[in-house]
Each structure stands twice: as structure tokens, then as C-alpha cells.
């Protein structure tokens, strides 16, 4: 769940104070075990979607005009992407993971809300930044603080972010100078009818991934950032089974992607999806 952090982040005073640190695992022991088995370890930090911090610290939350916490369509509170204290909090958590031995820090939900009554969201401490400026500014700040720990820095972005401005602050070309990799969520179920020139992106998962990655290639031409697609391994409206999952993986390989990542919110993955090509 977003907002929760590993027990070592009790060393982050604010995480301990708001009750975010939980005894899920021992990060340093996990990192050591992973490295003994030649596993590359990525620490995912969910940034601005944070129901725990936004509830405990109203001053750090996205608010409504009446002063209450603004919530998205799932009922979750978000912290204010403009607030430097929110930046500090999330990078402090990332530093804990870096010190524990994680190889890479991936910032997820590093964006403004995309669903719910976004027109009624009230932001404080904007410091003259626009949404298009705030997200790259956060990543620049995070990369600067993490540099001394020699970890790679990355961010997850919507698969449509390279096709058009979604109004959430995710512009891949502006983000690219501050990260080593962008993880594009090219889940076909996230694309509506007609997106990418496809009548039904969910019905053609391989072609959807191919076209989405071509948009990223065009948008990021001339940069050194690595683009790695997330592959949909879950059913939303159209059933996704082995054939659909493999079609996406094959498309990523044909596009020259240096890997891919599977996503299933329940952590249950399709048998055979990771078989050799």
C-alpha cells in the first residue's frame, strides 16, 4: 500500500511519527540475500500518492477549498507535489534504501493526480512552479541527494506520457536528464479506444506496446535515458493470459528494450511468462 515504508525508515523521524514504518522485512538483509543470488534490487518509492502522510499531516496534503484532504476516485489522499517537506520525506526514505544496499531507487506516482475531482484540488507552497516543472525539479533534487550512494535513479511514467501532455507533470523529455531509466507503464488496458491509432488497444497487446515504445523513442531521441516497459499481467476488461502477456514481451524485445517488468497488483504472475523466447 502506498505510504507504508520498511522498518529501517523509522530512522526517518516523520515516517516514525506518522506510523508509516512497518515490519514488512529487513532491507539490509534482503539486499544481502539478493546480491548473493546475483539479483538486481530496485527499491520502489511511492511518492505523492500517500494516504498515511496526507492524513497525519494535513499541512502537507493536497487540500480542498474547505481545508479538508482532497481524495482521488479511489478515496486515497495525496501529498502536495510542490511542498519541499514532502520532497525531503520521500528522498529520506529513498536514502534509507540506498544505504541498505538497494541497487536502484524507482520513484513511482511521481506525478500529480490523474483521476477524481482534480479541478477542486488546492495546492499550497507552489513557489511559482508549474506542474510541468515540479516533477522534473523533484527528480533533480532526489538525484542530487542520492548521488553519493552510487545508486541508479529511475521513475515510473504512464505509457501515454510520450504521446501527449497528460496534465500531471510527467513529460519524459524533461524528466530524462535527472534519471537513469524511465519505466513506461504500457499496459494495454490503460489506453482508451483510438489511442495510438488503435481501435481497441487491449485487443492487440503486442502492437500497443510496440507503438507506445516508438513514441518514447521519438520523444527521447538524443538522450541517454533507458526506457523499460511495464508489461500487463492482469485482467482488467479484456482477459489477459499467457498469449497476451507474451505478445507484450515479444514486442518489447523487437523494439530493442533492454528488459521489461511484469505488473500484477496481487503479485500473482502467469506461469510461463518468463520462459526464454
Image (cartoon, rainbow, N blue to C red):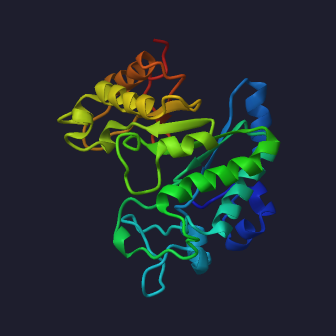
Up/down of 23 relative to 265, above or below: below
Label total for image? 0
Residue 5 seen in this snapshot: yes
Question: Which residue is at 25% across, 40% downward?
Answer: 195
Up/down of 165 relative to 128, above or below: above
Query: Relative to residue 22, is residue 124 drawn left or right?
Result: left
- Give the image quarter of residue 272: top left
- Give the image quarter of residue 7: bottom right
Question: Which residue is at 71% across, 66% downward?
Answer: 15
Residue 24 seen in this snapshot: no
Up/down of 186 relative to 115, above or below: above
- Give the image quarter of residue 209: top left
Query: Quadrant location of the N terminus?
Result: bottom right
Q: How far across and how far down the image is residue 179, in percent?
A: 62, 40
| Foreground of the two, 243 or 208 | 208
Query: Quadrant location of the C terminus?
Result: top left
The residue lying furthest to the top in this view is 277
Question: Which residue is at 44% across, 75% downward?
Answer: 70
The residue lying furthest to the bottom in this view is 66
Q: How far across and how far down the image is residue 136, in percent?
A: 57, 51
Up/down of 239 relative to 127, above or below: above
| Foreground of the two, 118 or 217 | 217
Q: How far across and how far down the image is residue 52, in percent?
A: 58, 69
Q: How far across and how far down the image is residue 178, in percent?
A: 63, 43
| Foreground of the two, 147 or 151 | 147
Amino acid at each position: 500500500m502506498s505510504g507504508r515504508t520498511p522498518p529501517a525508515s523509522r530512522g526517518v523521524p516523520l515516517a516514525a511519527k506518522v506510523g508509516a514504518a512497518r515490519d514488512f522485512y529487513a532491507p539490509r538483509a534482503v539486499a544481502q540475500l539478493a546480491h548473493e543470488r546475483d539479483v538486481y534490487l530496485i527499491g520502489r518509492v511511492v511518492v505523492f500518492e500517500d494516504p498515511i502522510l496526507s492524513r497525519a499531516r494535513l499541512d502537507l496534503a493536497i487540500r480542498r477549498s474547505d481545508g479538508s484532504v482532497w481524495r482521488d476516485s479511489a478515496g486515497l489522499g495525496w501529498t502536495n507535489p510542490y511542498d519541499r517537506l514532502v520532497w525531503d520525506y520521500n528522498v529520506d526514505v529513498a536514502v534509507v534504501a540506498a544505504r541498505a544496499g538497494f541497487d536502484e531507487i524507482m520513484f513511482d506516482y511521481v506525478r500529480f493526480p490523474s483521476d477524481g475531482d482534480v479541478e477542486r484540488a488546492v495546492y499550497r507552497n507552489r513557489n511559482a512552479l508549474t506542474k510541468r516543472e515540479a516533477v522534473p525539479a523533484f527528480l533533480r533534487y532526489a538525484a542530487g541527494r542520492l548521488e553519493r550512494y552510487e545508486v541508479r535513479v529511475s521513475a515510473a511514467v504512464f505509457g501515454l506520457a510520450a504521446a501527449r501532455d497528460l496534465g500531471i507533470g510527467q513529460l519524459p523529455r524533461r524528466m530524462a536528464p535527472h534519471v537513469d531509466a524511465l519505466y513506461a507503464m504500457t499496459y494495454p488496458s490503460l489506453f482508451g479506444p483510438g489511442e495510438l491509432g488503435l481501435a481497441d488497444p487491449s485487443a492487440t497487446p503486442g502492437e500497443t506496446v510496440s507503438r507506445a515504445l516508438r513514441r518514447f523513442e521519438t520523444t527521447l531521441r538524443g538522450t541517454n535515458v533507458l526506457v523499460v516497459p511495464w508489461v500487463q499481467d492482469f485482467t482488467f476488461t479484456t482477459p489477459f493470459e499467457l498469449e497476451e502477456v507474451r505478445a507484450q514481451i515479444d514486442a518489447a524485445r523487437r523494439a530493442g528494450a533492454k528488459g521489461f517488468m511484469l505488473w500484477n497488483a496481487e503479485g500473482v504472475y502467469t506461469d510461463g511468462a518468463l520462459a526464454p523466447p
